[in-house]
Amino acid sequence: MIVEIPWKKRKLVAQLIDPDRAGEETLVNAARLADEAGVDIFLAGGSLTSVPVADVIKRLKQLSSIPVVLFPGNLTQLTAGADAVFMLSLISGRNPELLIGSHVIAAPVLKNMRERVIPVGYMLIDCGGGTSVEYMSQTSPIPSGKNDIAVATALAGEMLGMKAIYLEGGSGAARPVDPSMIKAVRDELTIPLITGGGIDSAVKVEMAFDAGADMVVIGNGCEQNPALIKGACLVRDSFNRGAVII
Ligand code: 1GP
């Protein structure tokens, strides 16, 4: 299946599945709760994985009809089987491998896959420091509060042809991307805006949507509190109906 992400229709909730923390029981439970809650998409991938992402994607597709988007942390995670692939360019950093190098290697492989490739301008934002993505990418995040730099970077991503911008606090970040930065970027962009990292409550989901995020990504928060995904989807539904319930 080739997925068109329904950006235009509504706000979206994505649940990130980290292969290394997704044993059989966890996956079965996550798929059931996500189905019940009405999660829009699964993202599958991680900064460092020892379990093949392909196995997790295959199992998710057996357990649920929710589309799965590959969210590759590195080239070893490039695999067929997902419905779409986020081709991430780390535009907040100055590591050439993550801006274009890996993409050159990935492009011929992706061309032979049936999955839809979605180019995403990936921006790491300092949300407390010390995240895996900061270390693994060997890039400096955009400092918190430097909304002008975030806006300029996101605009450059849009002008370069990215189909979405992802403001990333890093998995397990101490706090989410500040709503003022989300709003500043949203006000200038015409493409969809994704945010994730450190979103571990329905209130934080509400704040991100309220600031203008089109898609909220939740990983750790659902691992620690599986019921969170239902709360997140209820918040999404309230925005999509035009009313805020919390
Ligand atoms: C990480 O933005 C995602 O890439 C999700 O982060 O695990 O902190 O929810 P969390």
Image (cartoon, helix red, strand yellow):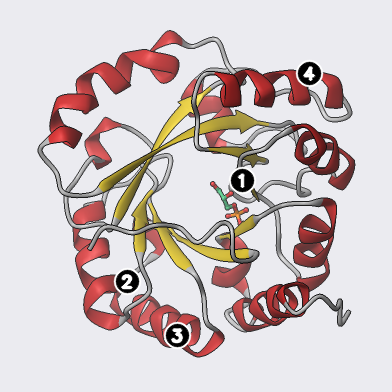
Label 3, label 1: how far apart the Cα atoms are: 24 Å
Amino acid type, callout 3 = Asp
Q: Quadrant of residue 159?
A: top right
Numbered tag placed on residue 149 in the rendering: 4
Crowdedness near tag 1: few (<14), some (14–19) or many (≥20) residues, C-alpha within 10 Å: many
* Location of residue 163 with respect to 99 vertically, above or below: below
Disc 1: which residue: 192
Amino acid type, callout 2 = Gly
Reading the chain from its start, which is encountered first: label 2 or label 3? 2
Q: Nearer the viewer, mark 1 or mark 2?
A: 1
Reading the chain from its start, which is encountered first: label 3 or label 1? 3
Disc 3: which residue: 35
What secondary structure is marked by label 1? loop
What secondary structure is marked by label 4? helix
Q: Nearer the viewer, mark 1 or mark 4?
A: 1
Q: Quadrant of the C terminus?
A: bottom right
Label 1, label 4: how far apart the Cα atoms are: 18 Å
- Residue 130 versus residue 227: which sits nearer the camera? 227
